[in-house]
């Protein structure tokens, strides 16, 4: 809980166990850099050697089975009984470490120790009081010190089950910083167990890419950026690099695709049936009356447009539907199991005469009577939404409250207005076969949302999906069967959309979903749910077989145009197909909440107001990622902007980019300008590290010079916004910061 941000990195597919690397001379470094840059001019399909078998997840699961057959499963269930969210986090980290250890080629005994340590690294939370573990807000200093005791508590619990000191050391040092600054008298650097150093990175990466009440999940690339920033201090820099390379090659490995299946297997494992009461045994395929009621309740609550929350008698949240996530921006995974708090939900009184801060759930539980009132929810971005709140007590045959049901209704007229606008355009904006939006309407909406996001409006994400082997469906089963597959897929997409989303058919078997006011991480989870639903939907015309689809996900980021967003999502889709199909790939760093158009104007682009744009525009971008990874990100920039590599010399690359801005004349040509961008890459050194092995780690500096190709464009009024947009996009793709202006200040 409340873990600090960290950063993630990746490794070469053929990497062996990480060892210290001898420093290269300057000539060798320049030669390697030139080779990497030169590769930008070549097509870069993923080679067979870099591909990992699609069944690798099955291998990882088979190895993990050996863990759950031992006493580790009992300890894991104990942790799950204490706090479900922590157990799910531990399982994801264990799968991550297992995939990583397999990639590094570690021996079986070390791999087993790392696997068990990862699965049980948070076991000490069993000894943490619920008031701290389930607290929805920021922890106090005293509470954080209590949480810091988790590794030692976990080791004490494990010591009663095993005498394997190597395993215990991995758990004990899992939170120890690589440079030892938080534990001056303890181990540091390479003296820390390899498993501890790996576990720290995988643990931080999962914490960053998981929703929390106090912070939404970061995108995969933003998490990599944070890991890179902390390399050499909090994390082992070589392992950060290896981890980042692994994510670059196989980004779907660390998504929670198999976690839910594993939780179900752990819960229903026949090996554990001797501990179950015979009266609870259910035959396969039999749904009891109570189970059927639960299915109906889930369907009802999940599809309501009103926000619905259930709490127990102590105010702990037990159910949180999708409408509440849409209203508050807080996911079910982040809030479930926490105490209800008006402040966390950002719910306040609309009537200034009422006492602010009085908890409506506490009032209901104390009085055992319903509470109804008009209130306001402050949504992310500072938007106030008027709502009607109804809190009702749940009572039984015995005196007292069993809990509460909270219903929150959005009383603004926005939804009604969207429905009316949609009905007006229905005839000309719908695909005739599937009934969803057509390509023309999608293009119009994507351009509109991009303009709003650029002006500081809400962010959005894009899912592009393509039915796998669709030609085979038509060839084997006929075109009517293909039409049924298209119609059913469109229905599944619409059933998983929310108010404000847009589902469209782009052409053929390709579909799109715009997730409005939704970030990269959340949209990726939604895409995975859609993928699983399609995979489990039998089609009568295909002999009750199902089709599968591949998904590419991205989020709007600074400097984007509608074209670059679509190109980046399409690149993610192609990577999903190259990596084995029937999977979800996420690309892009996402929209940074701490960067608004106003702060950008006052900050790293303020010099545009006074400098002469007739001169070359020069600046530096400093990114925490290593040079090889920075070049991979630059490769994505070139592909998404349809740029052309002009020439490569040593550590320098020159590209031609057709920049597009949203200001200019009435004609589209007035919004475009061909620019030449010359980028010089150099490795940066960090000299303040107390670990000699990492003093050369400091990221990559990219010196950028931009000028228009045509001389007449030097005085074009569109030059300034085109350069601003191009630099914003470069900064987003490289995951860096502007560190100097043309004057070097």
Image (spheres, grey):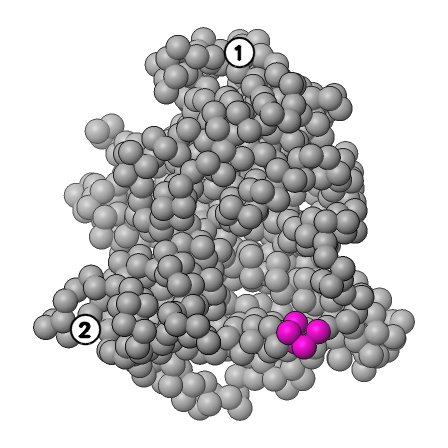
Write down the quadrant of residue 737 in the picture: top left
Residue 9 visible: no
Give residue 599's position: percent from left, percent from top: 23, 48
Q: Which quadrant does the C terminus fall into?
A: top left
Give the residues drawn in magenta, as a range.
288-292
User: Which residue: 54% across, 25% down?
Assistant: 155
State the residue position of label 2.
Answer: 350
User: Which residue: 17% across, 64% down?
Assistant: 356
Q: Nearer the viewer, residue 372 or 739?
A: 372
* Dominant secondary structure of the residues highlighted in magenta in the image: helix
Q: Is residue 665 above or below residue 434?
A: above
Q: Secondary structure at mark 1?
A: helix
Q: Is residue 353 above or below residue 69?
A: below
- Drawn side of residue 575 relative to residue 742, left or right: right
User: Which residue: 46% across, 90% down?
Assistant: 423
Q: Nearer the viewer, residue 534 or 598?
A: 534
Q: Is residue 716 above or below residue 173?
A: below
Residue, far front: 398
Give residue 103's position: percent from left, percent from top: 70, 30
- Drawn side of residue 91 relative to residue 402, left or right: right
Magenta highlight on residue 637: no
State the residue position of label 1.
Answer: 191
**Are there few (<14), some (14-19), or many (20+) residues within 10 Å of tag 2?**
some
- Drawn side of residue 311 relative to residue 113, left or right: left
Q: Which quadrant does the N terminus fall into?
A: top left
Write down the quadrant of residue 43 in the picture: top right
Res 574 label: none
Give residue 288's position: percent from left, percent from top: 71, 74
User: Which residue: 21% across, 64% down?
Assistant: 358
Residue, far left: 353
Q: Secondary structure at mark 2?
A: loop
């Amino acid at each position: 809980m409340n873990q600090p941000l960290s950063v993630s990195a990746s490794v070469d597919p053929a990497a062996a166990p990480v060892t210290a690397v001898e420093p290269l001379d300057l000539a060798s470094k320049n030669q390697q850099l030139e080779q990497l840059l030169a590769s930008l001019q070549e097509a870069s399909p993923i080679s067979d050697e870099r591909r990992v078998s699609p069944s690798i997840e099955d291998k990882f699961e088979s190895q993990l089975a050996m863990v759950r057959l031992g006493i580790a499963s009992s300890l894991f269930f104990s942790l799950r009984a204490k706090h479900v969210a922590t157990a799910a986090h531990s399982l994801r980290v264990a799968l991550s470490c297992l995939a990583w250890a397999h990639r590094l080629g570690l021996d079986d005994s070390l791999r087993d120790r790392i696997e068990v340590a990862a699965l049980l690294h948070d076991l000490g939370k069993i000894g943490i009081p619920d008031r701290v573990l389930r607290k929805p807000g920021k922890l106090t200093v005293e509470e954080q010190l209590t949480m810091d005791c988790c590794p030692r508590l976990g080791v004490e619990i494990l010591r009663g089950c095993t005498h394997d000191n190597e395993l215990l050391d991995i758990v004990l040092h899992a939170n120890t910083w690589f440079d030892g600054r938080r534990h001056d008298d303890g181990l540091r650097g390479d003296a820390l167990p390899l498993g501890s150093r790996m576990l720290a990175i995988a643990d931080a990466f999962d914490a960053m890419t998981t929703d929390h009440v106090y912070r939404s999940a970061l995108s995969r690339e933003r998490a990599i950026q944070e890991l890179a920033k902390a390399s050499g201090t909090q994390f082992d820099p070589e392992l950060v690099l290896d981890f980042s390379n692994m994510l670059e090659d196989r980004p779907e490995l660390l998504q929670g695709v198999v976690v839910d299946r594993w939780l179900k297997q752990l819960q229903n494992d026949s090996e554990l049936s001797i501990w179950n009461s015979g009266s609870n045994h259910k035959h396969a395929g039999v749904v009891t009356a109570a189970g059927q009621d639960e299915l109906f309740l889930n369907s009802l609550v999940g599809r309501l447009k009103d926000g619905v929350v259930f709490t127990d008698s102590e105010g702990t949240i037990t159910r949180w539907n999708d409408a509440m996530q849409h209203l508050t921006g807080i996911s079910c995974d982040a809030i479930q199991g926490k105490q209800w708090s008006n402040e966390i939900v950002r719910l306040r009184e609309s009537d200034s005469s009422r006492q602010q801060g009085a908890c409506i759930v506490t009032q209901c539980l104390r009085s055992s009577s319903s509470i109804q009132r008009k209130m306001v929810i402050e949504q992310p971005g500072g938007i106030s939404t008027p709502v009607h709140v109804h809190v009702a007590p749940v009572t039984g045959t015995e005196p007292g409250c069993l809990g509460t049901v909270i219903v929150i209704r959005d009383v603004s007229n926005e939804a009604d207005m969207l429905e009316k606008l949609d009905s007006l355009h229905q005839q000309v904006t719908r695909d005739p076969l599937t009934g969803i939006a057509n390509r023309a309407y999608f293009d119009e909406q994507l351009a509109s949302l991009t303009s709003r996001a650029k002006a500081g409006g809400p962010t959005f994400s894009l899912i592009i999906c393509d039915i796998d082997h669709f030609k085979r469906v038509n060839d084997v089963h006929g075109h009517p069967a293909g039409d049924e597959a298209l119609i059913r897929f469109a229905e599944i997409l619409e059933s998983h959309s929310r108010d404000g989303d847009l589902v469209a058919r782009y052409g053929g078997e390709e579909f799109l979903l715009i997730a409005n006011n939704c970030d990269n991480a959340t949209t990726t989870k939604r895409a995975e749910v859609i993928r699983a639903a399609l995979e489990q939907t039998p089609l009568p015309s295909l002999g009750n077989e199902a089709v599968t689809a591949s998904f590419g996900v991205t989020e709007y980021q600074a400097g984007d145009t509608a074209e670059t967003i679509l190109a980046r999502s399409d690149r993610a889709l192609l990577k999903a197909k190259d990596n084995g199909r029937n999977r979800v790939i996420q690309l892009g760093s996402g929209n940074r909440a701490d960067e608004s158009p106003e702060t950008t104007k006052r900050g790293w682009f303020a010099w545009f107001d006074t400098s002469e744009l007739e001169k070359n525009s020069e600046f530096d971008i400093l990114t925490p990622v290593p040079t090889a990874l920075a070049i991979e990100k630059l490769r994505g920039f070139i592909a998404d902007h349809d740029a052309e590599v002009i020439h490569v010399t040593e550590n320098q690359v020159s590209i031609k980019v057709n920049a597009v801005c949203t200001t200019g004349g009435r004609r589209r040509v007035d919004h475009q300008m061909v620019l030449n961008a010359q980028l010089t890459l150099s490795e940066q050194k960090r000299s303040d590290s107390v670990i000699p092995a990492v003093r050369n780690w400091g990221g990559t500096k990219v010196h950028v010079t931009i000028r228009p190709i045509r001389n007449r464009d030097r005085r074009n009024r569109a030059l300034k916004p085109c350069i601003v947009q191009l630099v914003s996009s470069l900064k987003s793709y490289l995951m860096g910061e502007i560190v100097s202006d043309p004057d070097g200040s």
